[in-house]
């Protein structure tokens, strides 16, 4: 049987930034395939390019050159409006500091991405209820972020990330602001998302114990992937 296309296919990817009049290289000649349904951890020292690579895969930033296909889509060929639409439908984001809206309840934070989809209020309520149930927060849906622990806020963020049923979840230091017990709970939840829902997860982490929960580990150093 023919193999399915990888969820992420990267060829000779290059990225640099301009600082004043100086060009600062960040990623050089990155080649990487990530299979659909994989759970990958990206590790490396600060400044190695981990978050930059994650942002390129998620369509938040653009590379200088190379090839980048995500879910079969050449995202380098999309204009800004097309890229925004593609992100909204294909990528869920989990951040270190949750990025919840403090004036919205847990329910309203999770519902937020659905407001761009045209779904009716009843369908939105049903989806949000299912997502919050999956992360174990049905009894906290009316609470504001300030009334939730760090681990609970990250669970809300995960529910928000999966609410549009994206194929890919990108997580940038998702346990970096949590105590060890809460971090383990979040990693177990991410494993469930990967195993039970088939989500492709790409996680940047400095934490070796977090990286061990992934199925594949990739190392970056000085902008290059290290075997």
Image (cartoon, grey):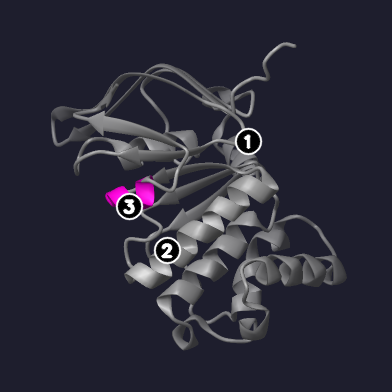
Instruction: From the top left corner, tell me how far across and down residue 6 is, in percent.
Output: 59, 23
At x 63%, y 35%, the residue is 82
Residue on which the image places disc 1: 82
Residue on which the image places disc 2: 184
Foreground: 21 or 176? 176
Specify whether residue 119 is painted magenta.
Answer: no
Residues shaded magenta = 206-211
Q: Main secondary structure of the magenta part?
A: helix
Q: Quadrant of the N terminus?
A: top right
CA distance separating discs 2 and 1: 37 Å
Residue 181: image quadrant is bottom left
CA distance separating discs 2 and 3: 9 Å
Q: Secondary structure at mark 2?
A: helix
Image position of 210 (left or right of 145): left
Instruction: From the top left corner, tell me how far across and down residue 86 is, in percent.
Output: 63, 39
Q: Earlier in the sequence, mark 2 or mark 3?
A: 2
Residue 96: image quadrant is bottom left
Instruction: From the top left corner, tell me how far across and down residue 51 is, in percent.
Output: 34, 42
Q: Earlier in the sequence, mark 1 or mark 3?
A: 1
Image position of 128 (left or right of 136): right
Specify whether residue 210 is painted magenta.
Answer: yes
Foreground: 185 or 70? 185
Foreground: 83 or 67? 67
Q: Secondary structure at mark 3?
A: helix
Residue on which the image places disc 3: 209
Say whether residue 88 is visible.
no
Whether tag 1 and tag 3 are in contact, CB under 8 A, the answer is no
Q: Give the number of the disc on residue 5.
A: none
At x 59%, y 81%, the residue is 105
Q: Secondary structure at mark 1?
A: helix
Q: Within 10 angstroms of label 1, few (less than 14), some, or many (20 or more) residues?
A: few
Foreground: 172 or 217? 217
């Amino acid at each position: 049987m023919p193999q399915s296309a990888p969820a992420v296919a990267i060829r000779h990817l290059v990225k640099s930034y301009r600082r004043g009049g100086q060009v600062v290289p960040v990623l050089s000649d990155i080649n990487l395939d990530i299979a659909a349904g994989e759970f990958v951890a990206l590790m490396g020292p600060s400044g190695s390019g981990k978050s930059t690579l994650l942002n390129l895969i998620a369509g938040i930033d653009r590379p200088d050159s190379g090839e980048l296909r995500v879910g079969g889509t050449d995202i380098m060929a999309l204009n800004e409006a097309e890229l925004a639409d593609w992100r909204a439908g294909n990528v869920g984001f989990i951040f270190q500091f949750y990025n919840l809206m403090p004036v919205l309840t847990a329910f309203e934070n999770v519902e937020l991405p659905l407001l761009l989809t045209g779904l009716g209020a009843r369908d939105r309520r049903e989806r949000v209820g299912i997502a919050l149930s999956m992360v174990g927060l049905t009894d906290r849906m009316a609470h504001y972020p300030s009334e939730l622990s760090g681990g609970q806020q990250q669970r809300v963020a995960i529910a928000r990330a999966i609410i549009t049923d994206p194929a890919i979840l990108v997580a940038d230091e998702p346990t970096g602001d949590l105590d060890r017990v809460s971090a383990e709970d979040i990693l177990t939840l991410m494993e469930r998302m990967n195993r039970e829902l088939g989500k492709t997860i790409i996680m940047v982490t400095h934490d070796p114990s977090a990286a061990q929960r992934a199925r594949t580990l990739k190392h970056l150093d000085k902008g290059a992937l290290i075997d």
